Amino acid sequence: MSRDKNPLLDPNRRAAATQMVHGGGKRTDFNETSEAIFLNSGYSYPSSEHAELLFQNKIPGGHNYSRFANPTVDMFQERMALIEGAEAGRAFASGMAAVTNAVMSQVRAGDHIVAAQALFGGCRYVVEDYAPRFGVESTLVDGRDPENFARAMRPNTKVVFLETPTNPTLELVDIKAVADIAHAHGAKLIVDNVFSTALYQKPLQLGADLVTYSATKHIDGQGRVLGGVVLGSRELIEGDVHTFLRQTGATLSAFNAWVLLKGLETYELRIRQMTDSAEKIVAALASHPRINRVIYPHHPSHPQYELAKRQMQRGSTIIALDVKGGQEGAFTLSDSLAVILISNNLGDAKSLITHPRTTTHARFTEEVRLETGVTPGLLRLSVGLESPDDLIADLMYGLDQV
Ligand SMILES: *Cc1c(COP(=O)(O)O)cnc(C)c1O
């Protein structure tokens, strides 16, 4: 057959846009175009000997139980690994399950974690509250200066954990600089890459050991299912990460894996469109008299603009706004909107606005909130797929009411 010599048969030669549609896909004997959903918990074997070999890990790609091996989930994991440029990946029931696995699979009692203090609420809880309960101490630092990580490192530091840009104030952490510090101390760097997306920032290429995503966000991107994924070297993923998943069981369902596979088919298109719109909104609001500050990584007013240009291909889909008039101003703006919805989710086709001080960051003290830039007037806007002109008009109407 002439197709045999076609170089594009090699998945590694395909561009990212092609991976998003085809990567990791496997067909059954029915030759279906869309990926099949394998809604089965277990598998039967042709012989006892086959089962014996399978349980000895001697049958590559074999499946013995859907807690850790399911063909639909496999396809999602493989597609994500191809998009990220990772050797391997494992999928989880949620983003928090993925982060918890990535961090906890790398530590044991007596170890130490260094993390950036500006973290997604649940992630901060894992390192600040849960890890210490199991004898793993943690130190939180201001992530904007890599020196703060260097100063916090101890001989028993095993994990450095960060997200960049941070939620919700879009501060950046220099991934490469922190990777070098972590590695000089024999620690692993784990990066939560949700805000930048797999399109615009490549933590593994910058030195990270593991990358995590909440697939609930841009990967599904249509508000349907929860999911998470951890990506990295074959050694880490097939070792610690797989074992933790297999034995603790925060497994992604096959149905949700299938929804996420469908989400990936339009991942690039959606994120590109949302980023185009975010740039237009930032340009329209940047000098608005009722806004103190618009925060967006690829806007020249961002205090770490140079790093943003170096580390992120584009500014991505989230904007933070500090509205005049504090909490009252922020509430007035949000409550006047007709298209943009008030919601704490992000990365969705629908534009969503949230007031972090009273929602996602309500459990923190005012001192912690101010330390991470969560001022009373701060709003986080996740830009969706609506007409950018409508989004700008909606925000302008809201600002007129402030
Ligand atoms: C949403 C989110 C998570 C948690 O993901 P879930 O799917 O909600 O469990 C972790 N980190 C970041 C940066 C997120 O935005």
Image: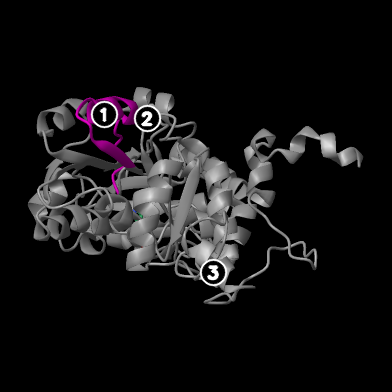
Residue 258: percent from left, percent from top: 59, 65
Amino acid residing under circle 1: His
Residue 235 numbered mark, or none: none
Q: Residues within 10 Å of mark 3 (few under 14, many from 20)?
A: some
Q: Amino acid at mark 3?
A: Ala
Horizontal side, residue 323 vs residue 134: left or right: right
What's the distance in space between the residues labelled 3 and 2, CA to CA? 39 Å
For disc 1, does the CB lie below 8 Å from ligand 1? no
Q: Which mark is residue 183?
A: 1
Q: Earlier in the sequence, mark 2 or mark 1?
A: 1
According to the picture, the residue beneath numbered tag 2 turns out to be 207
Labels 3 & 1 near each other (Cβ < 8 A): no
In the displayed structure, would residue 67 be above or below residue 137?
below
Work out whether mark 3 precedes mark 2 in sequence or the reverse, and give the earlier one: 3
- State which quarter of the image contains the N terminus: top right
Is the image coloured rainbow, by chain, by secondary structure, or in one colour?
one colour
Q: Residues within 10 Å of mark 2 (few under 14, many from 20)?
A: many
**Mark 2 in CB contact with mark 1 (< 8 angstroms):** yes
Give neighbour class at mark 1: few <14, some 14-19, many 20+ (Cα, 10 Å): some
Horizontal side of residue 134 vs 293, given as left or right:
left
User: Which residue is more in the foreground, 228 or 372?
Assistant: 228
Query: Closer to us: mark 2 or mark 1?
Result: 1
**Highlighted magenta segment, given as a residue range:** 168-190
Splitting the image into four quadrants, where does ligand 1 fall? bottom left
Residue 372 x/y as whole percent: 19, 45
Q: Is 133 within the magenta?
A: no
Q: Quadrant of residue 8?
A: top right
* Label 1 SS: helix
- Name the foreground residue: 49 vs 390: 49
The residue pinned by badge 3 equals 51
